[in-house]
Image (cartoon, rainbow, N blue to C red):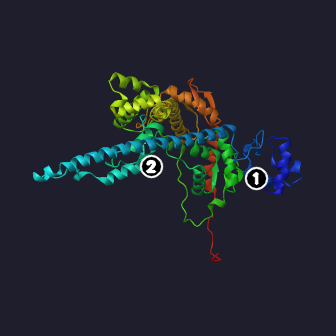
């Protein structure tokens, strides 16, 4: 931050109120041009909103306190800590699952070896009758692949596909990791991990909105209004205003005011380039439906088998932890002197805290968490899916508002237009009216009563900005030519 911006920052820290460039010049002694440069530098560092008066003056509002653009609120810091703790717990518990699966795998290998030994003992008889060993068809490579898949905690495959939820909304979804035996089915080990923590959601790039806006500007002659940022990201008016100033600072844009009083950003620097590099993808808010939140994404057969396995572990670990295994052994007429393995373990569990811990309490806690985590996630997922459906409805209404340029419409008219797409769930007029009340607040809209007595919803600021930006683009002449190369040196 330069010295001019530091001078202005010291002044506005003493009285954090909205101000114009002329006021900034008056309190600092800078020229108006220097004050504008200082404000632009401050906007790169701190969140700011631009306001336009009816006389065409720009007002800069940094809020009740200067807030760095890269700073996080207390709620965001708290959420980051909770997310970190959750990720740490997932790593620990997945390692626990891995150890359990390895133990199962070892038991499976022992059983396989016993089968091979039994098959080998019959080989002589089979040769005498012209038969072949039953072990000939065992695929050891498949066994090794199954073993190594235990340590692959990432349960998603390499590709991505579109799926459709029950309301008909399409969304992006990771392909599951293919199975070892049947690549067309989901990997069973991945199903075990997903049974507890659920499938991994599609991740978004934290800079995706910035890349999208940059590509949009390059395609739209380097000018944009706040309404278009809302069409791309779906933000309400306050968040869109802050993001608008962030783009001005990030991409060296300039805030301009049109003849009819619309604030727009002009980004001439973004238009300069060779044209070889491809930018981000432009996708409007209403074309990006939120993905469905799934409990585990497994087939019912996998879930039943996994649940039965854990229920089996839960039952036996409870017997060892509670000491009931000793009573069962006594009732069955077994004794420690008989040398039976079960009776030895039962006697040891009753007399040794270590055996009780290893065969009782540790697997008992593991098995309880194995069921408890999905149960708690189920309550959270129900809430998330309700909010997701609401957000997808909002996206559909956004599309109608921008298609009609924010012109006054009744709930009946909006309902008719929004239900023209027969592939998604139909909305009632009551649903539309309830959501429009929220959108009026979020997008600085207005309500009025028509001659027929119906409530109309209008968005005059949206209408002004969208009509003005189209006019500006028609009149704007852009020269993005770099000219001839005058120097070509290796550095």
Residue occupying the far front of the picture: 337
Residue at image position (52%, 31%) is 380
| Marks 2 and 1 close (CB-CB < 8 Å) | no
Which quadrant is the C terminus positioned in?
Answer: bottom right
Q: Residue furthest left?
A: 129
Regarding mark 1 in the picture, which secondary structure is present there? helix
User: Is residue 345 at least partly visible in the picture?
Assistant: yes
Mark 2 and mark 1: span between their CA atoms?
49 Å
Residue 378 percent coordinates (x, y): 48, 31
Relative depth, front residue between 393 and 401: 393
Q: Is residue 22 something that shows in the picture?
A: no
Q: Secondary structure at mark 2?
A: loop
Q: Earlier in the sequence, mark 2 or mark 1?
A: 1
> Which residue matches tag 1?
40
Residue 380 - label: none
Mark 2 nearby-residue class (10 Å; few <14, some 14–19, many ≥20): some
- Mark 2 — residue? 152
Q: Position of residue 214 (x, y in %)?
A: 60, 55
Residue 221 placement: quadrant:
bottom right
Looking at the picture, how far across and down is residue 213, in whole percent?
A: 60, 52
Mark 2 or 1: in front is 2
| Residue 30 vs residue 320, the one in the foreground | 320
Please give left or right for residue 106 compared with residue 224 in the image: left
Q: Position of residue 225 (x, y in %)?
A: 64, 48
User: Which residue is more in the foreground, 472 or 423?
Assistant: 423
């Amino acid at each position: 931050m330069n010295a001019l911006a530091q001078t202005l920052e010291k002044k506005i820290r003493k009285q954090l109120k909205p101000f114009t460039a002329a006021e900034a010049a008056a309190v600092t002694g800078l020229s108006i041009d220097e004050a504008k440069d200082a404000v632009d530098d401050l906007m790169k560092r701190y969140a700011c909103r631009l306001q336009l008066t009816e006389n065409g003056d720009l007002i800069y509002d940094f809020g009740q306190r200067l807030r760095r653009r890269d700073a996080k609120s207390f709620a965001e810091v708290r959420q980051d800590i909770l997310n970190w703790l959750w990720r740490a717990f997932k790593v620990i518990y997945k390692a626990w699952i891995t150890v359990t699966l390895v133990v199962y795998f070892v038991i499976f290998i022992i059983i396989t070896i016993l089968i091979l030994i039994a098959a080998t003992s019959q080989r002589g008889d089979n040769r005498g009758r012209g038969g072949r060993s039953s072990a000939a068809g065992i695929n050891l490579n498949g066994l090794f692949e199954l073993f190594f898949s235990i340590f692959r905690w990432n349960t998603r495959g390499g590709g991505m596909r579109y799926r459709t939820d029950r309301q008909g909304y399409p969304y992006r979804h990771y392909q599951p990791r293919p199975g070892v035996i049947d690549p067309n089915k989901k990997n069973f080990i991945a199903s075990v991990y997903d049974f507890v923590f659920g499938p991994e959601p599609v991740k978004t790039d934290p800079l995706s909105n910035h890349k999208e806006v940059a590509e949009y500007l390059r395609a739209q002659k380097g000018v944009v209004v706040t309404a278009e940022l809302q069409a791309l990201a779906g933000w309400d008016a306050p968040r869109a205003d802050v993001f608008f100033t962030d783009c001005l600072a990030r991409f060296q844009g300039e805030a301009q005011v049109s003849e009819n009083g619309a604030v727009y950003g002009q980004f001439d620097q973004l238009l300069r380039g060779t044209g070889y590099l491809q930018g981000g993808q432009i996708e409007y808010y209403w074309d990006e439906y939120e993905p469905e939140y799934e409990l585990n994404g497994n087939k019912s057969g996998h879930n039943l088998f996994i649940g039965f396995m854990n229920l089996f572990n839960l039952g036996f670990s409870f017997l060892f932890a509670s000491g009931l295994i000793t009573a069962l052994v006594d009732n069955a007429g077994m004794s420690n002197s008989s040398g039976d393995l079960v009776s030895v373990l039962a006697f040891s569990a009753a007399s040794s805290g270590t055996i009780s811990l290893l065969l009782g309490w540790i697997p008992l806690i593991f098995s309880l968490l194995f069921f408890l985590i999905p149960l708690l996630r189920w309550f959270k997922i129900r809430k998330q899916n309700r909010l997701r459906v609401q957000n997808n409805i909002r996206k559909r209404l956004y599309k109608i508002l921008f298609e009609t340029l924010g012109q006054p419409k009744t709930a009946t008219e909006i309902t008719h237009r929004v239900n023209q797409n027969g592939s998604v769930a139909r909305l009632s007029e009551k649903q539309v009216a309830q959501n429009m009340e929220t959108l009026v607040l979020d997008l600085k809209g207005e309500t009025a009563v028509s001659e027929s007595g119906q409530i109309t919803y209008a968005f005059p600021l949206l209408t002004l900005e969208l009509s003005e930006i189209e006019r500006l683009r028609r009149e704007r002449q852009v020269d993005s030519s770099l000219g001839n190369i005058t120097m070509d040196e290796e550095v």
